[in-house]
Amino acid sequence: MRPTRVGTDSVASADGPAQRDVIRARGAAVRFGERVLWRDVDLDVGPGTFTAILGPNGVGKSTLLKVFLGIQPLAAGSVTVLGSPAGAMRRQIGYVPQRRGFDRSLRIRGSDVVRLGLDGGRWGVPLPGRRTRRGRQAVNEVVRLVGASHYAGRPIGELSGGEQQRLVVAQALVRNPDLLLLDEPLDNLDLANQAAVAHLVQRICREQGVTVVMVAHDVNPILPYLDTVVYLAQGQAVIGAPKEVITTETLSALYGSPVEVLRASDGRLVVVGTPEPPALHSDRHAG
């Protein structure tokens, strides 16, 4: 079965020019042994857009990010990222993997964590000089961008989860990437910090022109900011604008069984009838 593509406002046409797409997938499939994780995924992600990957645990949301990074091979189809085969332009991609927070005993400063995004592969203490000054300036600029200047000099282990996450996002941005991939960056944050980090990511997307693709277990904190949703389930994908994908009709068709999308009094979405709806996941590290 081909993936369902709902609406056309936020997703480029399959016949559109390839150079417009930051990510372009055609007939993409991933297989582990005899199990097909997902197949026939067609996706166009335009520049400066915000896309969320949703779905139950174990359907391959994080795997899709790994495909974009070029570290997970496809069983079928093709994916290009920034106009090249996946993996070829990795230095132009910022990546925030799943993480549970830093140990409270860790004494490395927040600004040094950010700097690892510049020279984490180098050994030794940076030598004084123009390169070091440029690096320091880049770190300071991105720390200001994420609103972390007043605590970046403190040990990372002493900071709150939201403060740590801002610095991890800064680390991914310090090389000025064109594409930012985030794997459940709101996990383990309280509601206030989820909203703050979601707003930060949207601001980076809009003001800096960075294309953002985020895996999320709860769509609600990012729903107002999204251009496109990729909903994975049953080995298939539904792709389109959030208001067209996260509906009773669309998700019922995807799962092949009744699913109801409800809106609570505070505006949050609740999906009822799936094995693990995106707003109600319990184990959020299985994919």
Image (cartoon, rainbow, N blue to C red):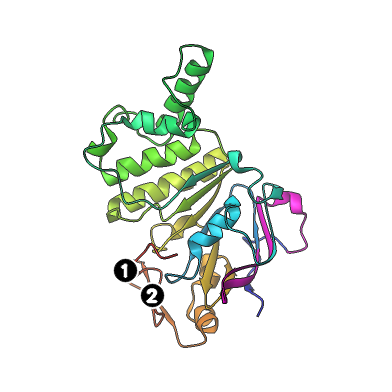
Q: Residues within 10 Å of mark 1 (few under 14, many from 20)?
A: few
Q: Name above or below for residue 283 compared with residue 205.
A: below
Picture quadrant of residue 273: bottom left
Give the label on residue 170, or none.
Answer: none
Question: How far from the left and from the top, in percent, is residue 43?
Answer: 65, 62
Name the residue tied to disc 1: 282
Left or right of residue 32, residue 165 in this image = left
Residue 227 visible: no
- Between the residue at mark 2 and the residue at mark 1, the CA separation in whole angstroms equals 8 Å
Which callout, 2 or 1, points at the residue further toward the start of the chain?
2
At mark 1, the secondary structure is loop
Q: What's the residue type where badge 1 is placed?
A: Ser
Q: Residue furthest bottom?
A: 257
Q: Within the magenta stretch, is there residue 66?
A: no
Question: How far from the left and from the top, in percent, is residue 255?
Answer: 50, 82
Name the residue tied to disc 2: 276
Q: Residues within 10 Å of mark 2 (few under 14, many from 20)?
A: some
Mark 2 touches mark 1? (CB < 8 Å): yes
Left or right of residue 31, residue 279 in this image = left
At mark 2, the secondary structure is loop
Question: How far from the left and from the top, in percent, is residue 85?
Answer: 70, 51
Residue drawn at point x = 64 percent, y = 43 percent: 89
Q: Residue furthest top?
A: 129
The magenta stretch spans which residues? 14-42
